[in-house]
Amino acid sequence: MNSPRVELRLWLKDWPGWNQAGPIILQEPIEEGETLRSVLNRLAERVPQFKETIFDPMTQSISDEVALVINDRFQSLSLGLEIKMQDGDRILLFPYLAGG
Amino acid sequence: MLWKKNVLLVKALRLPKPYFSCLFCIALLFIGNTHWGELAMAFEPPGPEERLKAIAIPYFRRPVPVHNKLLLSDRARALDLSAKEARGGLLYKWGTGGSFSSLAQTGGLPIRNYSTNLFPEHEKMNAQYIRTHFEHRSKPCWGCRIAHTKIMKVTEGPYAGFEGEEPEYEGMAAWGPLVGNTDAGAMVMLANVTDRLGLDVNEAGWTIAWVIECYEKGIFTRQDLDGPEMRWGQVESIRSMLGKISRREGIGDLLAEGVKRASEKVGGEAPGMGIYVQKGATPRGHDHRSIWAEMLETCVSGTGTLQSGSRLVLPSVFGLPPVSNPFSPWEVAGLNAKLDGWWVFIDTLGICRFITTDPPLTIDCLNAVTGRNFTLSEVMTIGRRVINQLRAFNFRHGLDPTLEAPSSRYCSSPTDGPAEKKDIRPYFQWMKNFYFELMGWEPNTGKPLPTTLKALGLEKLIGTF
C-alpha cells in the first residue's frame, strides 16, 4: 500500500533546477495526521532555498511574499499552519502578486 | 508651469474619440492610469470637438544635475538588484505576465466577465509559456535594467507570424480569459491591436466581455452588433469590434462610452452584467472578488484605479506586520490606509514602480540626486498630500461618494474557483467608512477633515469643497 503523500507545486525562483516554464512539482510523503507546519519545516531543513524564500523555521512563518492555495482554495494564514494534511492534498505556493 | 514652456500640444483633427482612449508617453507605454495621466487631462480638458492627441516633450539640452554621483551609482545598483530579486525574481524573469498562473490559482484572474472563476488553460497562456514558445527580444524602456518589455513574434496557431509587443499582464488578462480566448497568439495580436487603436486595454476588455455575455444571453442580436456574432473566444469578431469602438462606428458609438454608460443606456439586465465602479471606470484586469484590497482602492482612489498598491507593496518593507487574512475587512481597510502615500509619491517622481521595490533604497537614490535628506515618513506625507489634493479636486468637480462603490456584478460572490463564496458585500460599506476614518476624512463622505488638511500643509483647501 502506498504511503500517504501530498503534492506541492512551487512557482518560485531559486529552487534547485528551477528554470522551467511551469511549477516544480514535489510528491512529499506525510505521516498520519501530520500538519502543514511539519511538512514545511521538513522541506526547509532539506532545501536551503525553501527556507530563504518560503518558510522560515526560526519564526515558523510563511513569507508574506507567498500565497498559499490548498486543494484549489485560497488559504488564509489566519487559520494557521496547524491544518492537518491528508493523502492527496495539493498545496500550491507562489509569489503573492497581481499583474500590471 | 514648466510644462507650458517645454511642451508642444498636438491638437487632434476633429475626430471624436472613445471615452476610454488613453494617454501614451513617447516611449509608447501606457500612463493613463497614473497620476501623470490625470494631470495631463486636467491640463487640456477634452471638449466635444478638440481632443488632446499628444504631448511632445523635447529633450533637455543640459544633463540633469546630480548631487552625489558616486552615492547614486552605489544605491542605484543596490536598488536594481533588489528589483530583480523582488517576489522571487518573477517580474525580472517573466515580466508582468509572470503572475498570470498565480492569479489563476488564487481566483484573481478575470474570466468570462466574472461568470466563472475557473481557467484550466492558464498554463498555455501565461508568460512562462509565451516566452518559451514564441520568439522574443528585449525592448526595454530607456535606461531600465529590469528590461521586462519584449518584442514578440507568435510562432504557433492561427496568428503565427504576427509580431508586436509582448502584452503586459493586463493585456493578457483582457484578451485571454476575460473574453474566453484560449489561444496565446491571438492574445498577443489583440493586445497590440488595442494599443495601436489607442484604447485603454482594461476598459476595452471589460466592454467586449460585457458585449459577449449580452450576446450570449440574447440581449444583443447580430443586427444590433452590425453583423458579427460575439461569442466567447471569437477573436476576429473581437478585433472587428475594437475597430468599431475606436471609430465610434455603428454599435461602436455606444460601446465607446465604456461599460457603465453603455450598459445603462441599454438598460434591463445589461447594467447588472457590467463590471465597473459606480463613479464611471472599470477596474484593472483582475477578479477583485478575491482581491478585496484592490476592489476597495479601485472604488475610492483619486484616479479610479489602484492608489495604495497594498497588494503589491509588502507591509514588511515599511516595517509593518503581514496581512494574515486578505478577506478580513479590518485588515484590508487598515492596510490600504496605512500604505497610502508611497505609490502616489513614486508617481510624482515620474519613474517606474517596478524599480522601486525597496523604499529605503529608492529614497537613498532620490537624496543622492537632489542633495536633500528625505525620510520615509516625509515622502509618505508628500504622497498623502497629493491624495488629499486629488480628493479635494474631485469633490469640487462633483464627486458623489455614494458612487464610490462596485457594480452588482463587480462585487458579486464567486460561484466557483479558489475564492468560491467569498462575499465582500456585507462588509464593503463598513470597509469604506473605516478607510475614510483612518485617512483622516469624514467617515461617511470621505471628505478630508480640516485637521487633516492642516497637518499636510493644505490649509488653502479648507472650505473649498
Image: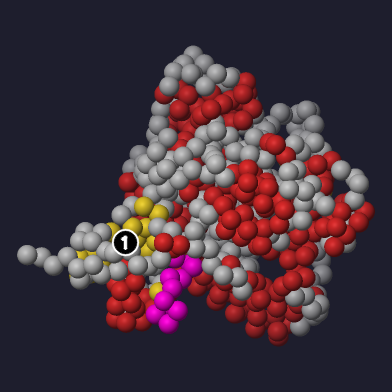
Q: How is the image coloured?
A: secondary structure
Residue A34 vertical placement versus B45 (above, below): below
Residue at far top of view: B223
Question: Magenta segment: does it hold B176?
Answer: no
Tell me the quadrant of the picture where the C terminus of chain B can be found: top right
Looking at the rendering, which quadrant does residue B245 occupy?
A: top right
Label 1 CA crowd tier, 10 Å (few <14, some 14–19, many 20+) = many
Residue B247 shows up from this direction:
no
User: In the depicted view, which residue is nearer to us: B201 or A58?
Assistant: A58
* Residue drawn where x is 59% and y is 44% of the image: B428
Question: Magenta segment: does it hold A58?
Answer: yes
Tell me the quadrant of the picture where the N terminus of chain B can be found: bottom right
Q: Which residues are magenta?
A: A56-67
* Residue drawn where x is 77% and y is 75% of the image: B374
Residue A14 shows up from this direction:
yes
Q: In this rendering, would B224 be left or right of B371?
A: left
Q: In this rendering, would B434 be left or right of B375?
A: left
Query: Residue B319 location, x and y as percent?
Result: 61, 74
* Residue drawn where x is 79% and y is 43% of the image: B394
Query: Residue B134 location, x and y as percent?
Result: 38, 54
Q: In this rendering, would B401 be left or right of A39?
A: right
Q: Disc 1 marks which amino acid?
A: Ile
Residue A55 vertical placement versus B396 (above, below): below
Q: What residue is shown with label 1? A: A91
- Give SS at disc 1: strand
Looking at the rendering, which quadrant does residue B337 occupy?
A: bottom right
Query: Residue B395 location, x and y as percent?
Result: 80, 42
Query: Residue A57 location, x and y as percent?
Result: 39, 80
Residue at far left of view: A1
Residue at far bottom of view: B70
User: In the depicted view, which residue is nearer to us: A33 or B89?
Assistant: A33
User: In the depicted view, which residue is nearer to us: B183 or A88?
Assistant: A88
